[in-house]
Amino acid sequence: MSAEDQTAPETQKIEHDATVDKLEINLQGLNILEKTDLAAELETVKDRLEAIEKEERIGADPEKVALEELQKSTEELISIRKQLSEKQAELDALDESDNDRSDVSAEVERLKKEVDEKEHHWNATKEVWRREFGPIVDSNSSLSTGINAANQHDIKRLQEQIASLQKQLDEVSLRRKQMVADAEEQHRRLVEQDDSIDDNKNEE
């Protein structure tokens, strides 16, 4: 075995650890969502949209588009979380021997994945709004971003930012799942190796 082959596993471990650190940092923002009052968030968005309608402020269209997207994302997340909660309660109430338990359990897992996807999208949408319009909270603000042509450009840019952030969050989620799968596969191989060693000892 060459020196390069001998050092490869250690190098891979260092790279793997660095990847884990990056993923943990990126996922810290997602953990905040667990403590977020979505109902209050939704009311804030609706209030801001209502204020924009009353302002008739030139240049408000990009913020309105971002808020409407955030409102939609928040409503969808609240709805799917409610479905998951109800289905989980149904599963918890079933006896271990109940024939329906397998189907209900599968539905719970499906809803969990959908909740995860909706949370990723909500985070991306909220981040775009916060970064672009978070400071604008005064309904009497005189800020103007230009005429309709400029507004349309800003709207398109916001939509692109939402899509970009969503893609980044999806990539983090996929890489995290792949790391878990790799760890499980490594554990399975180790178990098989241990079983093989035990079998050889028994034969001797």
Image: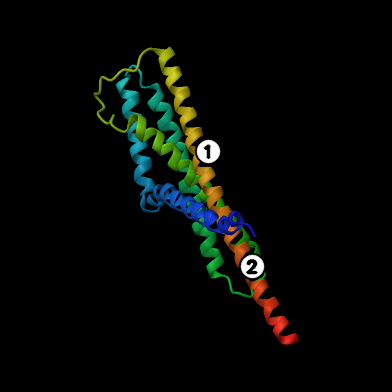
- Nearer-N-terminus badge (2/1): 1
SS type, badge 1: helix
Q: Residue furthest right?
A: 203
Q: Quadrant of residue 189?
A: bottom right
Horizontal side of residue 135 vs 8, given as left or right = left
Which mark, residue 188?
2
Residue 17's x, y, as percent?
48, 55
Q: Which residue is mark 1?
A: 167
- The residues bearing labels 2 and 1 have C-alpha atoms spaced at a distance of 31 Å
Mark 1 surroundings within 10 Å by alpha-carbon count, few (fewer than 14), some (14 through 19), many (20 or more): some
- Would residue 23 be found to the left or right of residue 141 on screen? right
Query: Does any portion of residue 80 appear in the rendered image?
Result: yes
Q: Position of residue 13 (x, y in %)?
A: 52, 57
Amino acid type at mark 2: Arg
Task: Pick the quarter of the image with the N terminus.
Answer: bottom right
Is 190 situated above or below 170? below
Residue 43: which numbered mark, if any? none
What amino acid does circle 1 point to?
Lys
Q: Which quadrant of the rendered structure holds the C terminus?
A: bottom right
Residue at image position (41%, 18%) is: 151
Q: Quadrant of residue 95?
A: bottom right
Q: Is residue 36 above or below residue 47?
A: below
Q: Percent position (x, y) of residue 134?
A: 31, 33
Q: Residue at x 49, y 48 (%)?
A: 79
Residue 28 vertical placement versus 135 (above, below): below
- Secondary structure beneath dot 2 equals helix
Q: Is residue 134 left or right of residue 10?
A: left
